[in-house]
C-alpha cells in the first residue's frame, strides 16, 4: 500500500486579501477587517501585521495607529468571502482527485501517487500559480505524509519567504529539521493550555513532542494528543472525509447594531434567526428535534440593568418546516422576555438533528392522520428555498420584517463585487 501524501492549501490573510483584490489602490496599504458590528480586528493584511496590530483587539483601542499609519477599515463582507472561497475550492477540485474543504480558506488535497507524474514541490507551485491566476488570491502550500505535518509545512511556507510559499515535507530528514525549529504551540490542535502543560514537562518544540512517550501523552492528556505525536512521526491517524460529517447543532445568532427595547422587534429578529437556521437545516437534509432560544443584554455595558435568559423545547416530531420552528421559537421568546431591558443579542439553536429515517410520526398529529400533509410541507419549503436561491425576490416568514432594527453595524462594508450586478467593479 502506497504511503499517503497530503497537501494543505491555505489562502494568505484571506479576508484582507479578498478586500485588496478589488482595491488595487490599496495594494501596499495596511488594512484590517472587523468583526460583527465593527467591534474587533479579525483579519489583517501583511502591512497591518508589520505595524503590530493584534488579532482580536477592539478597534477603538487602535484609533491612534489607524490615524498615524492610514490603516483602512473594512466591515466583514461574508457574502464576498464565501463566494471567493467557492472559487478557490472549485479551482482546487479541478487539480486534485480528492479535496477535503477544512475551512473557508483551507483545504486538504490527496496527492497519493502524484510523484509518478511530477514532483510534489512542482505540483505545489502549480497550485499556487493556478489559484492566483484563476481567482487572484495568494495561497501557500504545505505537503507531507500526514495532515498534521502538512499543517506544519504550510506554517513554514508562510513563515519563511525563501520557500516561495511551497514546502514539501515528504522527506523524513527534512521533517525532523523543521520539527526542531517549530514551537510546540504552533502544532495543529495544541492550544495554549496544552502548550503550557507540555512546556512544564520540558516539551518545548515539535520534535520533542514527536519523540515523547506515547503512553504518557495518552495518560496525561488524551488519545488525541497521542495521535498528533504519531502524525508528527509520519503515521497518518486522521481519516479522510470526502463529505463533511452531519452537523450536530445549528446556531444562528447575532449581536444587534443598536439595542432593542421591545418584544415586537425581538420577535422579528428571532423569527429571522429561526428561519435562517431552518434553511440551513434543510440544506443538509436534516430535521431538528430540539429548539433553544436565548436573549441577553450587553454584559460590557455596566451602566444599564443586566438580563440573560434562555429556554428550550423538545419537538414531539422532528421538523424542518420553518413555520413550525418559528412558532416554537416565538413561544419560547415570549416566555423569557422581560420588559425594561436593552437587549443586545439573541439567537436560535437547533439540536437533536437527524435525517429523514430518524423522524418518528406522532399519533395525534395531523400528518399522522393525513400523510399527505407532511408531503405538502416539504414541497412548500422546497419551493421557498428554490425562490430564495435563484431569484432576487425573497420569500420571508410573516413575522420576519426587514433587518433594519436588528442589523449589524457595518459602517465600512465593501460592495458585493461578485454577487450583485449593480456592484460589479468598474475599470476606467
Image (cartoon, rainbow, N blue to C red):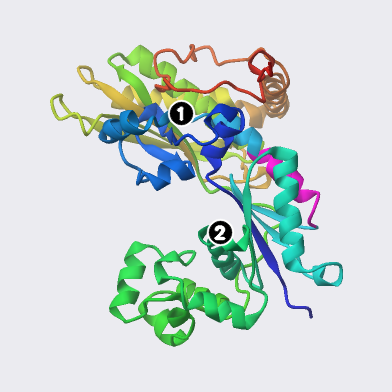
Q: In this view, does 408 lie to the left or right of 233?
A: left
Please name the predominant secondary structure of the magenta segment in the image: helix
Q: Can residue 278 be seen in this view?
A: no
The answer to whether residue 365 is above or below residue 113 is above
Between disc 1 and disc 2, whose residue precedes?
Answer: 1
Please identify the quarter of the rendering in which residue 421 is found.
top right
Cα–Cα span, label 1 and label 2: 27 Å
The answer to whether residue 60 is above or below residue 141 is above
Residue 50: image location, x then y, percent:
41, 47
Q: At 51% across and 60% down in the image, what residue appears?
A: 159
Q: In this view, does 359 lie to the left or right of 199?
A: right
Of residues 284 and 164, the one nearer the viewer is 164
Residue 262: image location, x then y, percent:
30, 13
- In the current view of this chain or complex, which residue is farthest to the left? 303
The answer to whether residue 284 is above or below residue 236 is above
Q: Residue 137 bears which disc, if any?
A: none
Residue 349: image location, x then y, percent:
45, 37
Q: Can residue 334 be seen in this view?
A: yes
Q: In this view, does 201 lie to the left or right of 93?
A: left
Query: Disc 2 on helix, strand or loop?
Result: helix
Q: Residue 161 bears which disc, if any?
A: 2
Of residues 271 and 165, the one nearer the viewer is 165
Query: Disc 1 on helix, strand or loop?
Result: strand
* CB contact under 8 Å: marks 1 and 2: no
The answer to whether residue 146 is above or below residue 272 is below
Q: How crowded is mark 2: few (under 14 residues within 10 Å), some or many (20 or more)?
A: few
Of residues 193 and 33, the one nearer the viewer is 33
Residue 340: image location, x then y, percent:
19, 17
Asked whether residue 95 is drawn in magenta, I would say yes
Give the labeled residue for mark 1. Answer: 74
Q: Which span of residues is magenta-colored?
A: 85-96
Asked whether residue 240 is drawn in magenta, I would say no
Amino acid at each position: 500500500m502506497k504511503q499517503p501524501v497530503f497537501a494543505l492549501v491555505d489562502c494568505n490573510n484571506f479576508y484582507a486579501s479578498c478586500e485588496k483584490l478589488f482595491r488595487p489602490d490599496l495594494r501596499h496599504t495596511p488594512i484590517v477587517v472587523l468583526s460583527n458590528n465593527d467591534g474587533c480586528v479579525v483579519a489583517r493584511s501583511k502591512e497591518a501585521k508589520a505595524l503590530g496590530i493584534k488579532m482580536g483587539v477592539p478597534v477603538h483601542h487602535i484609533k491612534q495607529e489607524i490615524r498615524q499609519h492610514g490603516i483602512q477599515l473594512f466591515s466583514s463582507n461574508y457574502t464576498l468571502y464565501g463566494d471567493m472561497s467557492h472559487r478557490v475550492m472549485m479551482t482546487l477540485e479541478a487539480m486534485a482527485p480528492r479535496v477535503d474543504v477544512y475551512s473557508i480558506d483551507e483545504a486538504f488535497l490527496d496527492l497519493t501517487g502524484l510523484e509518478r507524474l511530477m514532483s510534489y514541490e512542482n505540483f505545489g507551485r502549480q497550485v499556487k500559480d493556478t489559484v492566483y491566476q484563476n481567482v487572484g488570491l495568494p495561497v501557500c502550500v504545505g505537503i507531507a505524509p500526514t495532515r498534521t505535518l502538512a499543517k506544519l509545512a504550510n506554517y513554514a511556507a508562510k513563515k519563511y519567504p525563501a520557500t516561495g510559499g511551497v514546502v514539501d515535507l515528504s522527506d523524513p530528514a527534512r521533517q525532523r529539521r523543521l520539527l526542531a525549529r517549530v514551537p510546540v504551540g504552533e502544532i495543529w490542535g495544541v492550544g495554549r493550555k496544552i502548550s503550557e502543560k507540555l512546556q512544564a514537562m520540558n516539551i518545548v518544540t515539535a520534535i520533542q513532542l514527536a519523540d515523547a512517550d506515547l503512553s504518557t501523552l495518552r495518560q496525561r492528556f488524551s488519545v488525541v494528543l497521542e495521535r498528533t505525536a504519531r502524525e508528527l512521526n509520519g503515521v497518518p491517524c486522521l481519516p479522510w472525509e470526502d463529505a463533511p460529517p452531519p452537523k450536530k447543532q445549528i446556531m444562528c445568532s447575532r449581536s444587534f447594531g443598536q439595542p432593542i427595547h421591545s418584544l415586537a422587534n425581538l420577535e422579528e429578529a428571532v423569527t429571522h434567526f429561526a428561519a435562517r437556521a431552518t434553511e440551513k437545516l434543510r440544506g443538509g437534509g436534516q430535521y431538528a428535534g430540539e429548539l433553544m432560544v436565548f436573549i441577553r443584554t450587553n454584559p460590557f455595558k455596566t451602566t444599564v440593568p443586566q438580563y440573560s435568559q434562555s429556554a428550550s423545547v423538545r419537538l414531539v416530531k422532528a421538523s424542518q418546516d420553518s413555520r413550525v420552528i418559528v412558532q416554537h421559537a416565538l413561544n419560547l421568546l415570549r416566555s423569557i422576555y422581560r420588559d425594561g431591558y436593552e437587549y443586545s443579542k439573541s439567537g436560535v439553536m437547533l439540536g437533536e438533528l437527524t435525517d429523514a429515517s430518524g423522524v418518528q410520526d406522532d399519533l395525534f398529529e395531523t400528518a399522522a392522520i393525513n400523510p399527505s400533509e407532511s408531503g405538502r410541507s416539504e414541497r412548500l419549503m422546497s419551493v421557498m428555498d428554490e425562490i430564495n436561491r435563484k431569484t432576487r425576490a425573497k420569500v420571508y416568514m410573516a413575522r420576519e420584517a426587514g433587518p433594519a432594527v436588528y442589523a449589524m453595524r457595518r459602517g465600512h462594508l465593501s460592495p458585493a463585487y461578485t454577487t450583485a450586478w449593480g456592484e460589479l467593479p468598474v475599470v476606467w
